Each structure stands twice: as structure tokens, then as C-alpha cells.
Image (cartoon, grey):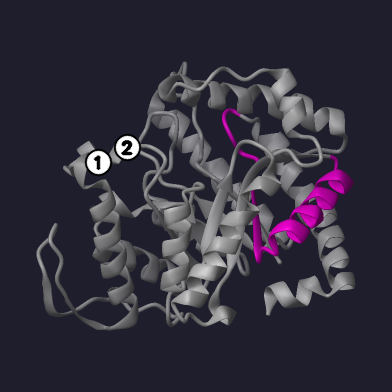
Amino acid sequence: MELGLYTFADVNPNPSRSKGAEGAERLKHLIEEIELADQVGLDVFGLGEHHRPDYAASVPAMALAAAAVKTKNIRLTSAVTVLSSEDPVRVFQQFATLDLLSNGRAEIMAGRGSFIESFPLFGYNLEDYDQLFEEKLDLLMALRDEEVVNWKGELRAPINGRGVYPRPLQDPLPLWIAVGGTPQSVARAGAMGLPVALAIIGGEYPRFAPLFELYREAARRAGQDASKLKTSINVHGFIADTTEAAADQFYGPQAEVMNRIGRERGWGPTNRAHFDAARGPIGNLFLGNPEQVAEKIVAAHKVFGNDRFLLQMAIGLMPHDQIMRGIELYGTKVAPLVRKALTETGEGAKATA
């Protein structure tokens, strides 16, 4: 099983200094985090796309390209690319370029996005939400499959026999579908034979297991090659030297983010009691000392049979030094424990085959 991290490069939306200075420091820290993740042997780093004042990553491919020249082994993926409001041609070109710069380590994780700011920003109608994603995903897959593209849809001009360059080193360029728990999205990914990444940011994680069963059944019904199907769970959490430190350091920044988003979406406010329940054995937060987090990752793998596990530690205004320590512990303590446990059960070889 691949182990990695993802983030949206959170910044203070109301900084005491200029937003430019705030963004510059966060991106500097981001590159340092990716470098360290590579150095300690983690497998994947994902960077999500947002178009809001509380995030610095509106162009993941560009930030990942900066990291590509400073890393050697870690895979670099969007987490996610909001494909519905993007131009698939430019997405393909950006990530093909990233693939060349990284010597074949780029991936695209495409999704609808959890926010809608990008739709009016780029001139799209929210009434076309579903059709935009379906058409653009179809075009992106055509771009992966053929150098010279012939494609026609309803919401953009057709492409008639045009070549799209550069071509990536990987053939095909890896493409995952990111979902937030919608059964239709999971089933579509399975029917298309594409890997799926499931975000679990609330509730007890075992209740999401039927979605992967639906994914695999949809793939089977569509005649997809089961060996090409891959799954990831993407969760919130944090690792520190002690359980108490992990909880105390992570609670404030994570709660602030969840409450801010909750006010926009009509969720009730969170509190420390909710937080502490969520870091229990089957809660959605993967948080604690290295041994606890490793044990929970292995337990979740028994439930999901997932090929990848991505942890979001850099959420909200987490101090950079705490994030760096968390990454160090993840790579040097947690990852070896997880890999050893999965190897002993035979699951490690199965998940990475």
C-alpha cells in the first residue's frame, strides 16, 4: 500500500501582512514539506486546487513542478483538479510537463471539487455542473489515449484532428477520480475502469466500505480489468511524539477550518468532544503517536483493501515546524510499522502489485 500526504496549502485569509507575503511563505514551506516527505520515503504527495482566500494552491501543477526538481522518488499528484471548470487540454499539458520534469512521477486526481467559486470565476454555469464534468472527463481520457485528438461535445468547441503536446513520459498518464461519498460518482469511476480516491472527513470510516464494493461491482459489470482498479482513502489526521501533543496541536487549526466551512454549508459547529470521538478506533481522524496511527491505518486497510492512504496533516494554520515533525514521524516511524504489518499478512505485496 502506498502511503502519502495531501494538502490545500492553507493560508490565513486575513493576514496581518500582505497576502502576497503570506502566500510566498506558505509555498516555501510547502516545497520543504514535499522535499521532506520524499527524503523520509513516503510514496505520494497531493496538492488540491482551490480558488479562495484561505488557500494558496490554485495551480497545483505549477507548485508540484517546483517540487519535482527538488525530489527524486515521491509521486506528485493533484488532490484534486477541479476538472469541471478547467480546460482539459491545459490540464493534460500541465501534468504532461510535470511528468517530464519529474521523470515520470506525475498523476492527475480529477473531481468536481468541494467548492463552487471556480465556476463563475471561469465563466461556467452551475446548472451544467454534471454535464461539464462528464464531458471534460471524456475529453481528458481522449487526450491521454491519443496524440492526435478527434472529439466532440456539447459545451465546448470540438477538436478535429489536432495534436496535443507535450506527451508525458508515462503512457498513459495516471488519472484518478476523486469522490466525496456520492454512490453515482463511485460507480461511474468503476464502470470507466479508473482508480478512485475517497475523501473521508466525517463519521465512522467503516461505513464508507460499501462504496468500494459498489466501485468494484460496477467495474465488473462493465467488463473492466480488475487488475487496473485502485482505491485510495484520503483522511484528516496528525502524528506527534505523543497522543496528547497530536490532539492538542491539531484540534485548534482543524476545528477552525471545519467550522468556517460549516458556516458556509449549514453544518453545526464542532467541539473538542466531537474531535475526541472522531479520533477513536473507528472515527474519521487518524491521529496520535506513531504506533497508534500505524495501527489505525492497518485496521482501515483490513476494512477497505485500499491501495493508497493519504493523510491531510497541513490543514488550517498548523505551524510549519509541527507539520515537519509530523512528516518525519510518518516516514520514519509510521510507514515502517504499516509496511511490516501488511507484509506479514501478505497484503503489502498485493496492494502494490
Query: Could you say where residue 116 lies in the image, as x and y percent from the top left?
Result: 32, 37
Q: What element carries label 1?
A: helix
Q: Is mark 2 on a helix, strand or loop?
A: loop
Q: Depth check: give the residue in front, 212 or 13.
A: 212
Magenta span:
289-317
Tell me, for residue 32, which label it has, or none: none
The C terminus: image quadrant:
bottom right
User: Residues at badges 1 and 2 in contact (C-beta under 8 Å)?
Assistant: yes
For badge 1, the amino acid type reads Phe
For badge 2, the amino acid type reads Ile
Examine the rendering and report whether any part of residue 304 can be seen.
Answer: yes
Query: Could you say where residue 264 lies in the image, as x and y percent from the top left?
Result: 41, 22
Residue 291 belongs to magenta span: yes
Query: Which residue carries the number 1 mark?
Result: 119
Alpha-carbon distance for marks 1 and 2?
6 Å
Q: Depth check: give the residue in front, 319 or 148.
A: 148
Q: How crowded is mark 1: few (under 14 residues within 10 Å), some or many (20 or more)?
A: some
Q: Residues within 10 Å of mark 2 (few under 14, many from 20)?
A: some
Task: Report the side of 17 relative to 215 (left or right).
Answer: left
The N terminus: image quadrant:
bottom right
Query: Which residue carries the number 2 mark?
Result: 116
Task: Report the side of 336 relative to 114 (left or right).
Answer: right
Which quadrant of the figure has residue 238? top right
| Point 62% across, 20% down: residue | 270
| Point 57% across, 56% down: residue | 211
| Point 34% across, 76% down: residue | 144
Task: Please tell me whether residue 23 is drawn above or below residue 312 in the rendered image.
Answer: above
